[in-house]
Image (spheres, rainbow, N blue to C red):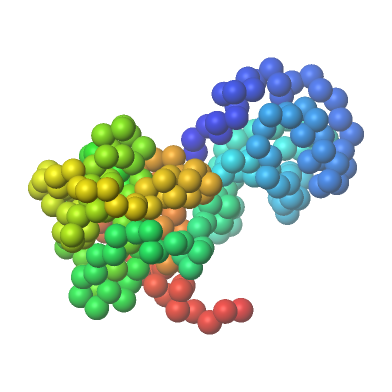
Amino acid sequence: MRAPAFLAVLGIAAFLGLPAAAQDVDQVKAALKKKLPEAPIDSVRKVPYGGLYEVTAGGDVLYTDGNASFLFMGNIIDLTTKENLTEARLRQVNAIKFSDLPLDSAIKIQRGNGSRKIAIFEDPHCGYCKRFERDLQGITDITVYVFLYPILSQDSIEKAKAIWCAPDRGKAWLDAMLREQFPETAAACTTPVDKNLALGHDKRINGTPTIIFENGDRVPGAIPIAEFEKKLAAAKVASNAPAK
């Protein structure tokens, strides 16, 4: 699990030598806020193992004790079920509700009947995005919503806007990603690029590609196509399940 961003900002000294007597969730959260005023603490909850309190902060999952004397990161594994409890919780914390995405701000590319759906935040100069787009060519019955998310350079921004303003956005995108053929700089048109950048910042999307599945699961980075197929199938099943 990656190191939380605020650990690097605050430094390890911030976590040591500060006594506290917090006994419940509100007290634990208040104690952490007092000790770590700059940390983006979103929630604190008691978990049913190890006498621990779970802390979510900026998309990360950490743990503390009842007195908020220590803060630590790492994966907690249930040895009975072999489930990675931390990983499962991270998926919940970072899930993005698919129906909340502004799909009119994305390039829609459909293959086959388009019954399976994903959204991807991508930069036109992202090498991993290009590799993943090549892999996607072999996937059928899928609708891909590409959110232009140019975070690598100013040229990425210009290329993204030119792709959006092209007569056929889907073709322009695939030409750029698969064949390195970018459109000529187009006449000015209104693009969703700035809105996409704001959306990605709000959702803590820090790299490309970032894949969003129908069930809300997000995957940062390109993944092997076999793993992608499994997640795509699982997301479809989950999205079709009746609400509880």
Could you tell me which quadrant the C terminus lies in?
A: bottom right
Please tell me whether residue 38 is drawn above or below residue 183 in the rendered image. Answer: above
Tell me which residue sits at (53%, 51%) in the image: 94
Between 202 and 96, the one nearer to me in the picture: 202
How many numbered marks appear?
0
**Residue at the extreme bottom of the image, as rendered:** 242
Q: Which residue is the extreme one toward the front?
A: 187
Q: Depth check: 84 or 28 in front?
A: 28
- Point out residue 157 in the picture as x, y percentages from the top left corner: 31, 39
Residue at 21% across, 65% down? 139
Residue 239 visible here: yes
Q: Is residue 126 visible?
A: no
Measured as percent of width and height from the top left, residue 90 is found at 55, 50
- Residue 20 position, x and y percent, is 86, 30
Above or below, comparing residue 216 to residue 59 in the picture:
below
User: Looking at the picture, does residue 100 appear above or below residue 129?
Assistant: below
Name which residue lies at 72% across and 37% down: 64
Answer with the quarter of the image where residue 226 lies: bottom left
Q: In this view, does 212 lie to the left or right of 228?
A: right
Q: Residue at x 24, y 73 (%)?
A: 141
> Taking 62 as reference, is 109 above or below it?
below
Q: In this view, does 110 lie to the left or right of 10?
A: left
Q: Could you say which is closer to the camera, residue 7 or residue 66?
A: 7
Closer to the camera in the image, 230 or 191: 191
Q: From the top left corner, tell me how far across and down residue 181 is, in percent.
A: 11, 46
